[in-house]
Image (tube, rainbow, N blue to C red):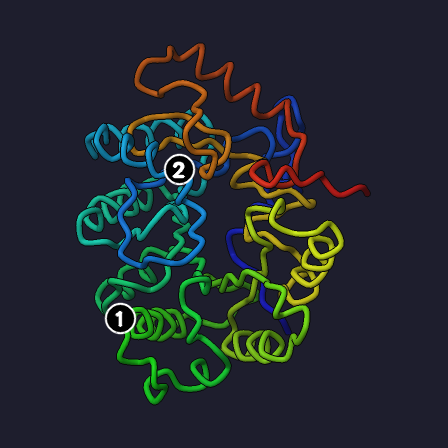
């Protein structure tokens, strides 16, 4: 039986839980996910990195980064006032790069003490056995990016240690993560989701993707397939076909890791983003045109902005501007 991604299962349960707020359910009446992307540091050098067009803004975030104690205070605020249950460290670089790794673990530890879980996006680089064990101990959910790790195939998942790519740091990091999380008791959900970006080559021959899906699910993990972040690069027919392929090969038929009722909750639903320098965004990937800065807005202005995000939900993915599926 395919296992659900734990964070998504928890969010869906919140949607089914009644509340006394305006929307009548716990998910929509809270800020379930507080996105806290770290300053951009990455040595991966992936071709067609989605962050490339935003590098000027990312450098500004890095130069103006807030002290860790300030960021921890916002975790406490959102836990107490807005019912946050997850913090996320999004796919804006390498969360375990040596320059920011300690900061990330401070965020995870602070959140854990408040009963909040973490959701992190990683390619496996800079992960050692101790870090993998710590993430599992804190019940962190992980999205493992395969975009920069083309070596990950069914053979790698069968036994990473004998795979030719095992000499690569990312390959060893993924092995440590899989080993640490494999020790968890069996349940209906998993805390690791592998993320794969479908391509035109997959349209021509989905054999490799199909085998990858079987191998991932055999470990008790799940596969989430996405389309490219830049649909304008494709002919409309090809883009539509890629969208269908992403749904077909995703373990639970959803092309986003945090989708509830067709909407990505991390960027278009019950969420709020505070960048490394305090800039505010609806979605963690909308870099460069913030809706203000958390350090200078008043509590009343913050409440108003959160209410605006709750009321204006037009897209399933605000970055791609994907329409919400019709019921």
Label 1 Cα neighbours within 10 Å, binned few <14 / some 14-19 / many ≥20: some
Q: Is residue 124 above or below residue 236?
A: below
Q: Label 1 belongs to which residue?
A: 169
**Which secondary structure, mark 2?**
helix
Q: Quadrant of residue 158?
A: bottom left
Residue 208 percent across, percent down from the top left: 58, 78
Front residue (pair 10, 220): 220
Question: Residue at position x 46%, y 39% from top?
Answer: 285
Q: Which mark is residue 3?
A: none
Task: Locate the C terminus and report the quarter of the image it occupies.
Answer: top right
Mark closer to the chain start, 1 or 2 = 2
Q: CA distance from mark 1 to mark 2?
A: 26 Å
Residue 278 percent across, percent down from the top left: 32, 26
Give yes or no for contact between labels 1 and 2 (Cβ–Cβ under 8 Å). no
Q: Is 258 left or right of 326, judged from the image as shown? A: left
Task: Locate the N terminus and report the quarter of the image it occupies.
Answer: bottom right
Q: Label 2 belongs to which residue?
A: 54
Q: Is residue 299 above or below residue 241?
A: above
Q: Is residue 3 above or below residue 80?
A: below
Q: Quadrant of residue 273?
A: top left
Label 2 Cα neighbours within 10 Å, binned few <14 / some 14-19 / many ≥20: few
Q: Is 76 left or right of 209, judged from the image as shown? A: left
- Furthest residue in direction bottom, as rendered: 162
Task: Please identify, in this view, whether the residue under mark 1 or under mark 2 is nearer the observer.
Answer: 2
Q: Is residue 60 above or below residue 212?
A: above
Residue 306 percent across, percent down from the top left: 51, 22
Residue 214 percent across, percent down from the top left: 59, 78
**Which secondary structure, mark 1?**
helix
Question: Residue at position x 28%, y 66% from top?
Answer: 133
- Furthest residue in direction right, as rendered: 327
Q: Is 64 left or right of 145, judged from the image as shown? A: left
């Amino acid at each position: 039986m395919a296992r659900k991604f734990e964070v998504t299962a928890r969010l869906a349960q919140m949607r089914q839980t009644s509340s006394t707020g305006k929307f009548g359910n716990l998910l929509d009446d809270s800020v379930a996910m507080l996105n806290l992307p770290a300053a951009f540091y990455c040595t991966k050098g992936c071709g067609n990195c989605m962050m490339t067009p935003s590098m000027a803004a990312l450098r500004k975030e890095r130069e103006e980064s807030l002290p860790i104690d300030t960021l921890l205070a916002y975790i406490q605020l959102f836990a107490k006032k807005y019912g946050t249950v997850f913090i996320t460290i999004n796919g804006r670089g390498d969360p375990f790069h040596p320059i920011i790794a300690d900061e990330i673990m401070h965020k995870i530890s602070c959140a854990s003490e408040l009963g909040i879980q973490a959701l992190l996006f990683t390619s496996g680089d800079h992960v050692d056995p101790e870090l993998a064990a710590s993430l599992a101990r804190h019940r962190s959910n992980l999205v493992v990016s395969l975009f920069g790790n083309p070596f990950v195939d069914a053979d790698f998942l069968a036994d990473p240690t004998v795979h030719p790519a095992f000499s690569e740091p990312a390959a060893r990091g993924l092995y440590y993560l899989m080993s640490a999380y494999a020790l968890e008791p069996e349940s209906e959900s998993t805390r690791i989701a592998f993320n794969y970006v479908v391509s035109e080559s997959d349209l021509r021959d989905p054999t490799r993707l199909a085998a990858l899906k079987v191998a991932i699910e055999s470990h008790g993990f799940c596969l989430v397939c996405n389309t490219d972040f830049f649909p304008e690069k494709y002919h409309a027919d090809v883009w539509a076909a890629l969208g269908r392929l992403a749904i077909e090969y995703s373990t639970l038929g959803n092309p986003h890791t945090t989708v509830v009722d067709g909407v990505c909750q991390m960027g278009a639903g019950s969420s709020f983003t505070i960048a490394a320098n305090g800039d505010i965004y609806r979605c963690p990937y909308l870099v460069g045109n913030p809706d203000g800065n958390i350090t200078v807005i008043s509590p009343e202005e913050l409440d108003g902005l959160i209410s605006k995000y709750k009321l204006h939900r037009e897209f399933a993915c605000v970055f791609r501007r994907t329409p919400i599926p019709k019921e």
